[in-house]
Amino acid sequence: MTAPDRERATFAAGCFWQVENDFRQLPGVTRTTVGYTGGTQESPTYEDVCTGRTGHAEAVEVEYDPTRVSYESLLDVFWHGHDPTTLNRQGPDVGTQYRSAVFFHTPAQQAAALASRERLDASGSHHRPIVTEITPASTFFRAEDYHQQFLEKRGMATCRILESEA
């Protein structure tokens, strides 16, 4: 449950470990939770989602203080933390569970996400069109405890594959 003076945002950008870590570094973010959303199966597990048959994406739910960080700033972290031009893929991770998506909770979030995607696509900073879906938030299922703050628990700064290694 979100605190009364906080707002919620939900993003999917490939494996949720790195995405969560990126948002946790942002001042004004008060809580992050990794989980699964956008699918059809009730209470999916990691193993279920990995099959690619549940329709869920690995996602991060972000609770934030809007007086300290704007939704637009969250969108900036989202866009710069992954490749929004690859359909159902991030690095070596392939499948609909690794898709790029913004799950909006309010009409204002929807408008901001659409405008942000349009600006980024028009900027020419990517050589391919952006394929990120912008869709209403649905039920968010919290992932298993061992996935929460995965990198932090292991003393890892990143799990990104460097461009030169890919």
Image (spheres, rainbow, N blue to C red):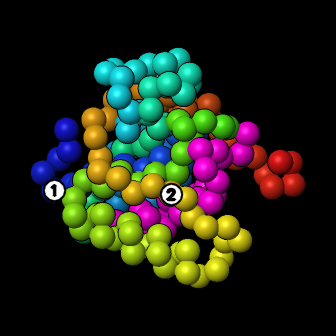
Q: In the image, what residue type sits under mark 1?
A: Asp
Residue 91, percent across and down?
Answer: 71, 45
Q: Which residues are magenta?
A: 68-92
Residue 41, percent across and down?
Answer: 36, 23
Name the side, left or right, on which 160 lies relative to 38. Answer: right
Q: Residue at x 52, y 51 (%)?
A: 100
Q: Residue at x 12, y 51 (%)?
A: 4
Q: Residue at x 64, y 54 (%)?
A: 86
Crowding at dot 2, Cα within 10 Å, few <14 / some 14-19 / many 20+, comes out as many
Q: Is residue 78 magenta?
A: yes
Judge whether 44 appears above or below 135 on screen. above
Instruction: Using the rendered view, name the quadrant where residue 28 is placed.
Output: bottom left
Q: Residue beneath label 2, please? A: 132
Residue 9, percent across and down?
Answer: 33, 53
**Observer-nearest of 67 and 52:** 52
Of helix, strand and loop, which one carries label 1?
A: loop
Q: Quadrant of the image for the N terminus?
A: top left
Judge whether 140 appears above or below 26 on screen. above
Q: Residue at x 57, y 64 (%)?
A: 130
Q: In the image, what residue type sits under mark 2?
A: Thr
**Residue 76 numbered tag:** none
Residue lying furthest bottom: 123
Residue lying furthest left: 4
Q: Is residue 100 visible?
A: yes
Q: Residue beneath label 1, please? A: 5
Earlier in the chain: of badge 1 and badge 2, it is 1
